[in-house]
Amino acid sequence: MKRIFAKINLFSNFDGGRSQAIPAMNFGCPVFFENIPALSKHGYDCRLLMSEYGQSISPGEIAEPVPIIFLSQDEVLLHVKVGAQFSLWEGKKIGVGEILKIE
């Protein structure tokens, strides 16, 4: 299964982000690609492979490279490229990311 590796910037709790860290275990949430017309109509379920990353990410932190897989991989990977930006969603926008590498 192909993965992207991304730079993740979690918003602080003060800025509307999570109140707790994303733990060092796999974490699922929708991702939105607002600037890619073919993907902008809805979110795409992903898994941040935090166990591979090896540490948690606290609100307000920037982490890279975080490995991510998509449940609808064929649809998403057809349209994304290095440099593509996205939003992480958990009932609200909790952070943003940028694709650094696709493998």
Image (cartoon, rainbow, N blue to C red):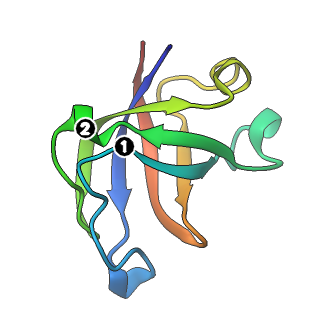
Depth check: give the residue in front, 34 or 63.
63
Give the residue number, with chain letter if any, for mark 2: 51
Q: Is residue 71 above or below residue 27?
A: above
Where, quadrant-wise, is the C terminus in this rendering? top left
Q: Amino acid at mark 1?
A: Asn
Mark 2: secondary structure = helix
Could you tell me residue 19's position as x and y percent? Answer: 34, 80
Could you tell me residue 98's position as x and y percent? Answer: 44, 41
Callout 2: 10 Å neighbours few (<14), some, many (20+)? some
Q: Residue at the spot x=45%, y=81% of the render?
A: 16
Give the residue number, with chain letter if any, for mark 1: 26
Q: Residue at the spot x=49%, y=29% of the render?
A: 69
Q: Tell me if 35 is positioned left or right of 24 in this view.
A: right
Q: Work out how far the residue at label 2 is from the one at label 1, CA to CA, in angstroms.
A: 6 Å
Which quadrant of the view contains residue 101?
top left
Contact check, label 2 and label 1, Cβ < 8 Å? yes
Q: Is residue 63 above or below residue 5?
A: below
Q: Tell me if 77 is positioned left or right of 83 in this view.
A: right
Depth check: give the residue in front, 79 or 53.
53
Which quadrant of the view contains residue 36?
top right
Mark 1: secondary structure = loop
Could you tell me residue 30's position as x and y percent? Answer: 61, 51
Q: Residue at the spot x=60%, y=72% of the render?
A: 91
Callout 1: 10 Å neighbours few (<14), some, many (20+)? some
Q: Tell me if 54 is positioned left or right of 71 in this view.
A: left
Could you tell me residue 89's position as x and y percent? Answer: 57, 61
Q: Is residue 37 above or below residue 19?
A: above
